[in-house]
Amino acid sequence: MAANIKVALVHDYLREYGDAERLLQVIHRLYPDAPLYTAFVDYQQLGTEAKRFAGWDMRTTFAQKLPGIAHPHRWRGLLPYLWENIDLSEFDLVISSSGDFVSKSVLTRAETLHVSYCHTPPRHLWERLRSHPQSLHWYDTWLDTRLRQYDFYASQRVDRYITNSHTAARRISKFYNRPAEVIPPPIKVHGEGQAGDRYYLYAGKLTRQMQVELVVRACTQLDRPLWIVGTGHDAEYLDSLRSLAGPEVKFLGEAPEEALPSLYAEAKALVFPCSSADFSREAVEAMGHGIPVIASQQSGLREVVLDYRTGILFPQPTVESLVDALNEFEGLRFSSVACIERAEEFAESVFVDRLQWFIAQALDAHHAIGVEPERDSFA
């Protein structure tokens, strides 16, 4: 890559330190002088995590001054004006980290290569998830229809797509009619450890979409100890989880990263029940500690968990199916070495090597013939 190339990063918004922000950090380490364009930064919501972005050349949009920053989807109708108001004309390479807030919609010159790491096409626009039913007012339906049309047309501006899994790549192919290179996100892999025998572990967000009630019901039905790490903002859902939980289910709240190794050390397995997830950082982290994973076969974790080698995939997103999987799991043995070796395939160094190679190839093609006809990455 040319040393004098000018690079800009684009990200939906900063209001939590989640999987997308972890990926953004790794990309920023590759391009430390690149400015970051983002819709807004919610410093209050970020709290102490804001220090992770200290020293960055942060450039927010006019959304930073809008009221109601805690509920940004209320003014989602402004998204086209928000992203298209950014001037990226001075840059040779733009890398966007795009999800529900469609930051891939930025405008770039024909000479500029725009590579988008698309975590997913916005699920609220393109799908009605079984675990997250919606009944919309007519205005919301109309607005989502307009935004869906805009999202499709904006998606055609991107030169190259990268995404986290073949599951997400199929979604990009279906909704945008574009191929996507699959480069799983970077994970810090512990590289040692083995499963314990005290409890099953769930780690992640406590939301309806994550279907946490499945593992709570299953472990309560079997009277198996379950430790739950994580929080959520839906008070009604959290109350329902606690009402479903038997005496063997413990809610630990948010755990600091330094506490996770000790939690993994005594866990039988990580249970990840969500059937709509494309990827799971927690699953790879668990395997990196030598812990097998029990996950939904309908999710993107079928690309991560090796069935009957590093865990078990249960077929249906039901309590009965998960109960059967837990019973079967307890009659099997799993190699901690196999789990760790599998996790290392998703290590940060692997991501960096693949991303740099992909961008270098894309830049060469872009400079050689302008815009190269896209190849099908599913071959």
Image: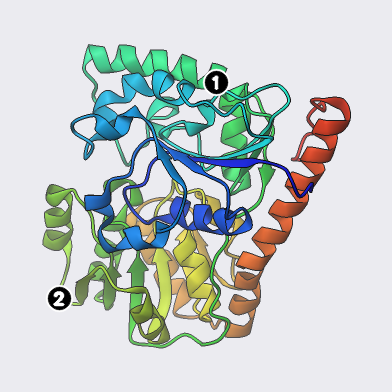
User: Which disc, if any, is residue 154?
Assistant: 1
Q: Which residue is drawn at 11% across and 56% down?
A: 239
Position of the C terminus, as image quadrant, is top right
Find disc 2 in the rendering and name its residue: 247
In screen coordinates, is 292 left or right of 65? Answer: right
Three-letter amino acid code at disc 1? Ala
Q: Is residue 276 above or below residue 228?
A: above
Secondary structure under badge 2?
A: loop
- The residue lying toward the viewer, choosing from 218 and 115, is 115
Residue 41 percent across, percent down from the top left: 33, 44
Q: Which residue is drawn at 29% across and 69% down?
A: 229
- What colour-coding does the image apply? rainbow
Q: Which residue is drawn at 57% across and 24% down?
A: 155
Q: Earlier in the sequence, mark 2 or mark 1?
A: 1
Q: Which of marks 2 and 1 is in front?
A: 1
Give the alpha-carbon distance from disc 2 to disc 1, as whole Å: 50 Å
Secondary structure under badge 1?
A: helix
Callout 1: few (<14), some (14-19), or many (20+) C-alpha neighbours within 10 Å? Answer: some
Whether residue 78 appears in this view of the structure is yes
In screen coordinates, is 75 left or right of 265? Answer: left
Q: In this view, does 194 lie above or below 356?
A: below
Question: CB under 8 Å between callouts 2 and 1?
Answer: no
Tell me the quarter of the picture where residue 127 sits.
top left
Whether residue 134 appears in this view of the structure is no
Residue 121 percent across, percent down from the top left: 50, 33
Three-letter amino acid code at disc 2? Pro
- The residue lying toward the viewer, choosing from 68 and 35, is 35
User: Which disc, if any, is residue 339?
Assistant: none
- The residue lying toward the viewer, choosing from 166 and 116, is 116
